[in-house]
Image: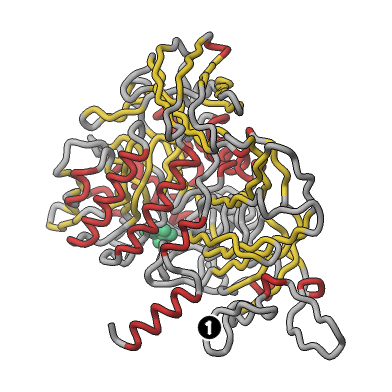
Amino acid sequence: MTNSGRSLLVLVCVLGLAASDEAQVAPLIANIGGRSTISLNGQWQVIVDPYDVGYVDYRAQAIKNKNAFYTDYKPQSKSELVEYDFDTSGHLNVPGDWNTQRESLLFYEGSVWYKRSFAYIKKANTRVFVHFGAANYLANVYLNGEELGTHRGGFTPFDFEITDRVKGEGNFLVVRVNDTRHKEEVPTVNTDWWNYGGITRPVTLVEVPETFIQDYEVQLEKGSTKEIRGWVQLNGRQLQQNVTVRIPEAGVSKTVRTNAAGRAEFSFPADLRLWSPETPKLYAVEISAETDKVTEPIGFRSISVRGTDILLNGKPIFLRGINIHEEAPLHASRSWSEDDARVLLGWAKELGCNFVRLAHYPHNEAMLRMADRMGVLVWEEVPVYWTIQWENPDTLQNAKNQLGEAITRDHNRAALIIYSVANETPIGEARNHFLGELIQEAHTGDPTRLVTAALQASERQDANGLHIRIEDPIAKELDVMGNNEYIGWYAHAIADLDKTDWSSDYDKPLIMSEWGGDALFGYHGDAETRFTEEYQEKLYEHQVAMLKRITFLRGTTPWILKDFRSPRRTLPGIEDYFNRKGLVSDRGEKKKAFFVLQKFYGELQGSTQ
Ligand code: GCB
């Protein structure tokens, strides 16, 4: 290794980006909402630290003394030099991004230190974990001046056990959150969304018995609507126990014994009212071990593919979808709450959707649970976006971790039917291998759901028009093909949509996972004028006409429900750092194209259901 290579490695390790750090997080606890919890949400003290002076010294070495911000050291005398103070540095809300809470932080990328003090009443035979819904991107977590561990990846949960470290009084939790973009990370440096930094999802203390039910899956057997299949995983010392899975409303119950590793698998027949967008039925499912018990609302439905059809509960379905970024509906900031989820999914339902693509990373858990309740099918994605370092094994491991964490969190959600492992990635050997590994990871991690990726088909133009063909070799390994196209916006003219035909190398269903164009709400003109509502409306009309002609199309998610912040979009007076492809403005106003899509989905509903 060259000297510069070595110093880069040292720096990477010092900044806490090494992959081995992830080993310090505890296994994820399923269904936090079904547990005894104490919220640590609210105002946290913060120090904005653009040069990481609370973390590394002027030789770029990790600081291990009182100058490290996580020690929260106070001067012992008036002459002692200490150059930081949480008590006088200000506050930010958790959960929440820092960018929209302080004007000076709108474009900020770097480190912010968060501190929160708390008291805790210790209980006998109880283990305690601190659980983060997400922090973007890298989180170094410390309790009472000692390191708990590190997590990287901005959109998935993580937790640390603190049973032996938490005290009755005077606990202080410190988190260094760093959202600096790096080439080797997932996502990489280049995206078309705001890099919202911070502790963006709830922080919770979770109490569980000494041996507890860490995770479980209770789903219909793949391809069946009558057989439940699943597993349960215990964590603790008493790993061999009887575990009973009960669905009282369905009158079913099954007892199994966990093995020496704390795991048991089960299957049993059940006569259930199936979950669907029209009848989003959820059952209270109880899992009881000898030392622990947890209950969760779970829906049951099957999802599969036959030729070019997608089958929900054995019947062909057309996915009337829309893309959504994780941004609050009426205030462009990272969203995380149930209320935000209700409004966003409410707009989708108003459009006539039965499906949403949660682009381009796993959204907050409230969104998935709301989709379960409201009856909206979900595409979940990992941020393998554009040009990841395909050859870097650490990048692949990171992408797999993020996918694994999303699966662990959401594998009991009926609404979730499909995982996307990538968006608009360039075909090539290293990329094909990388995506192949992720597809396999998704299939083994969750064998009941489908796997897709948003691809970009190849195109040829001749006197007869545009001929577009899906021939990406990775599609061979996908259950459903996704495809993004921007005919009439980035490429070609709106009129070309009328002379475009689609074909595919594969006998598989297609979801047109992106198309659209920008319009500034309230900006009117003729349909030739970019950024007018009329241009977007016309583009939607011609896109819809083209989609109707694609024989293997089984769903679509136009780009996008709502205008969202993006640093790439600089045009003054029009974009102002917003991507304006929303059907709804960032203030919640509906543009003309909203009604074009609503009409199309209305017709589809009328003809199919
Ligand atoms: C795309 C990307 C999406 C962008 C969109 C756009 O292809 O997948 O993230 O925001 O186009 O508006 O350009």
Judge by depth and name the residue closer to the eye, 472 or 484. 472
In which quadrant of this rendering is ligand 1 seen?
A: bottom left
Q: Residues within 10 Å of mark 1 (few under 14, many from 20)?
A: some
48 versus 452 height, above or below: below
130 versus 115 height, above or below: above
Q: Secondary structure at mark 1?
A: loop
104 versus 407 height, above or below: below
| Residue at the image position 22 percent from the left and 36 percent from the top | 508
| Residue at the image position 79 percent from the left and 77 percent from the top | 74
| Quadrant housing the C terminus | top left
Q: Can residue 248 be seen here?
A: yes
Judge by depth and name the residue closer to the eye, 31 or 477. 31
Count of residue discs: 1
| Residue at the image position 69 percent from the left and 57 percent from the top | 94
Task: Give the x, y percent position of residue 528.
Answer: 40, 61
Task: Give the x, y percent position of residue 588.
Answer: 62, 50
Q: What is the three-letter code of the residue carrying label 1?
A: Gln
Task: Give the x, y percent position of residue 323.
Answer: 45, 47
Q: Is residue 443 left or right of residue 589?
A: left
Q: Which residue is mark 1?
A: 61
